[in-house]
Amino acid sequence: MKKILALLKHVFDINQARGKLSFILLAIVYLIGIFDYARVHFKTNDKLPEFQPINTEAIKKLGTFAVRVRTGLFIKKFIVFDVINNRFVIDAVVWFEYNPDEIMLTTIEKFSFDNGKILSLSSPDVKIIGAEAFAKYNVIFELTTDLQFNKFPFEDHTLPIMMTNNFVTPEEMYYMVDASSFRMDAKFLSNWRIVDLNVDHGFTRLALDEENASKKAESPKALFVMNIAKASIKPTMVIFIPLFATTIFSLVSFIMKLSNTIGRFTLAVSAVTALLGYRFVLEQMMPKVGYFTTADAIYIFLLIFSFICFLFQLMITRQAEHSDDEKKKEPHLLANLHRINNIFFIAMLLLLIIVISFIMLR
């Protein structure tokens, strides 16, 4: 123990180490609070598909021959739930409730999913309930969506499932859904939690010819929306603990004695090289997108932060070597270097807190 204490006194400036370590610990506690705040507050930049809603006025415009078909979706399980690669394979039950005197089942069962494809579709199970028919299908379909990863790994997501029928127009048939029409078994989402489920219905109209309004494509739509948030803190910890642990090396270099030029320089350059090497690991955990995410912004800042600390240590250790040789001629030179070291340490610590807070809360 005495040897360890003697080594620490030889390496670190004990008189200032306690104060600087306290500042570092306070900064770590503050950053943990910022990260936890960003993690628990639901936020999503995902956009819902646009369509024209079906309301009382729209139903009047569609005409008296438009048939209402009530529909719903029950998700039994996700065979594939890969948010990073934006791929979902869903095992579900799709059902329809309709008047068989107004529309044929062969027309209704031509449903499909936007941005997806049906992998398996069972034969219909049809029951007659009063004047209405109830038909359900077991369906497995693959889906991709336009997920936004600007806030990765703190982003939450909105997963829209848009069902359509491209073989009829809204004047012939339109979907009707309500809050009770969308259900799912959420037990299988181990790393995600369901925030809420929403539904909507309407139709889309595409103008095929700008000069001829009669040339258009219209389709009824039923929208089922899942809002999901991360349920586990593990992915965030795996990404950021190595990044910030490495960055702390740069701050710890300010605690070491000025006379320990090799130790200060080695610790500072180790932080830079470790961050550069960790980028290859980080790429495997990042979504493949062409824009910067929160994780990218934090990584680039921490790399620049560590590089600035490295340059400072490079310059001050060279000055410390000269001042140690000439301290008898210039007794205030070494004291000034200590003052500069302390001021730069505080400035860099404040810069770390301010910039990380801005990136996390913007």
Image (cartoon, rainbow, N blue to C red):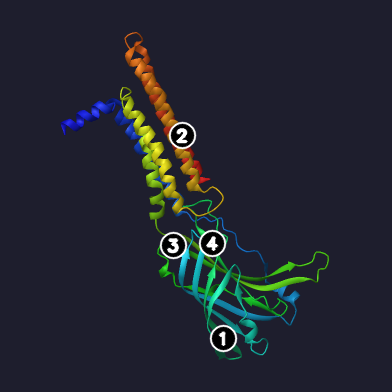
- Residue 174's x, y, as percent? 67, 77
Amino acid of disc 1: Phe
Residue 104 visible in this rendered orientation of the protein: yes
| Residue 249 percent coordinates (x, y) | 35, 36
Tell which circle, 4 or 1, labels the residue nearer the N-terminal end: 1
Where is mark 4, residue-wise? Answer: 158
Circle number at residue 134: 1
Q: State if disc 4 and disc 2 touch (CB < 8 Å).
A: no
CA–CA distance between discs 2 and 1?
Answer: 63 Å
Residue 243 is marked as none
**318 lies left or right of 222:** left
Q: CA distance from mark 4 to mark 1?
A: 30 Å
Question: Which residue position is annotated with label 3?
Answer: 192
For badge 2, the amino acid type reads Leu
Q: Earlier in the sequence, mark 3 or mark 1?
A: 1
Q: Amino acid at mark 4?
A: Thr
Asked if the residue under mark 3 is in contact with the one under mark 4, i.e. CB atoms within 8 Å, the reply is: no
